[in-house]
Image (cartoon, helix red, strand yellow):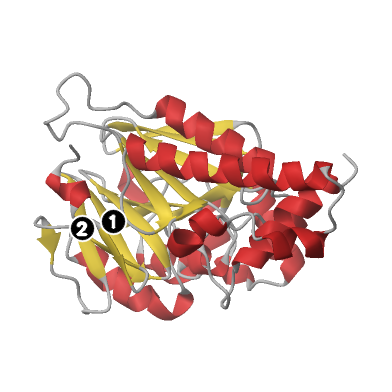
Amino acid sequence: LLPTVLASALVLCGSLSLPAQRVQPANRELEVIQIRPNFYVIAGAGSNISVQVGSLGAVLVDTGTEAMSDKVLAAVGKLTSLPIRYIIDTNADADHVGGNQRLSKAGASVLWGNLGNASFSEDVLTNGGGASVLAHENVLQRMSASGAAERLWPSKVYTARGYSMYMNDAAILIMHEPAAHSNGDSIVEFRQSDVIVIGDIVDLNHFPAVDLANGGSIQGEIDALNRVLDMVVPPFPFVWQEARTYVVPGHGHVMDREDLADYRDMVTISRDLIQDLIKKGMTLEQVKAANPLKAFRVRYGADTGPWTTNMFVEAIYKDLTSAK
């Protein structure tokens, strides 16, 4: 059985709802959920925002929309009196990076003042000594090319397969997924907290948004989900206890391994069903008319909005039929 903290998790109007362990946010439009003694999730600001707190201050993963940044800052202020030290962007979408400038400016770099050496001037030059904003270089390239305001750009980028650091006496591992939701996705593992933040590799509000135009792919999405599944530790053998790895998606409730496996299976089956229809020589319109994802429509489907079922079908179809 799932523990109470997960069994009662509900997705309501795009927010995350978990019982007990709540910290009253600065505004009722936000909900702050404590999932570990030093780890919180803020819902209702666009994307889910993860917050690790400790002796140095706060580390945030994603910042929500720009319009909600003041409310997010007030909510973080209720979790710690220390400044925000690091912000990690899991992708370049506006609902993940919109609060970058406001939250960074309100924070303080660990490489500035009495916590660091001022000769390490990268953050001083790029954001005036505010909290560092870290992302994969593809996030910066996409934001620059799309005309996103420079004030929202990351102040630090990593270019290899990953980036690691110690903050608040705990290991944080950032891993690049090169072609999942997009080509700039990062998975963030908080090792001591046993929490993995995966951004829009999972969006429980609808089918995953595979952004082909920005380097996403259906196989890369499945590969990313399988990678996280390999990292997640299930509660065995003491299944009645709450000890387990928690996974924070870009949108929706906090997950455990069973939830993630169900989502991975849905995506894999969706790919296979559409692949079978392609092998039969069906056109895109014929595939849409065949309604191959009808078994998942009630849970993940949408006929209107920013990401519909037909858009997901089209993304898979185009990806599978494109010249590689």
Split into 4 quadrants, where in the image is the C terminus? Answer: top right
Q: Residue furthest right?
A: 323
Judging from the image, what secondary structure is the residue with disc 2 in? strand
Q: Is residue 185 left or right of residue 206?
A: right
Q: Residue furthest left?
A: 20
Judging from the image, what secondary structure is the residue with disc 1 in? strand
- Identify the residue position indicated by label 2 in the image: 33
Cα gap from disc 2 to disc 1, whole angstroms: 5 Å
Split into 4 quadrants, where in the image is the N terminus? Answer: top left
Residue drawn at x 16%, y 49% as measured from the top left: 5
- Identify the residue position indicated by label 1 in the image: 41
Where is residue 224? Give x, y as percent: 56, 37
The residue under label 2 is which amino acid type?
Ile
Earlier residue among tags 2 and 1: 2
Q: Does residue 141 lie above or below 77 as drawn?
A: above
Q: Based on the displayed image, in which of its 4 quarters is residue 68 positioned?
A: bottom left
Counting other residues with Cα less than 10 Å from the Cα at mark 1, is it few (<14), some (14-19), or many (20 or more)?
many
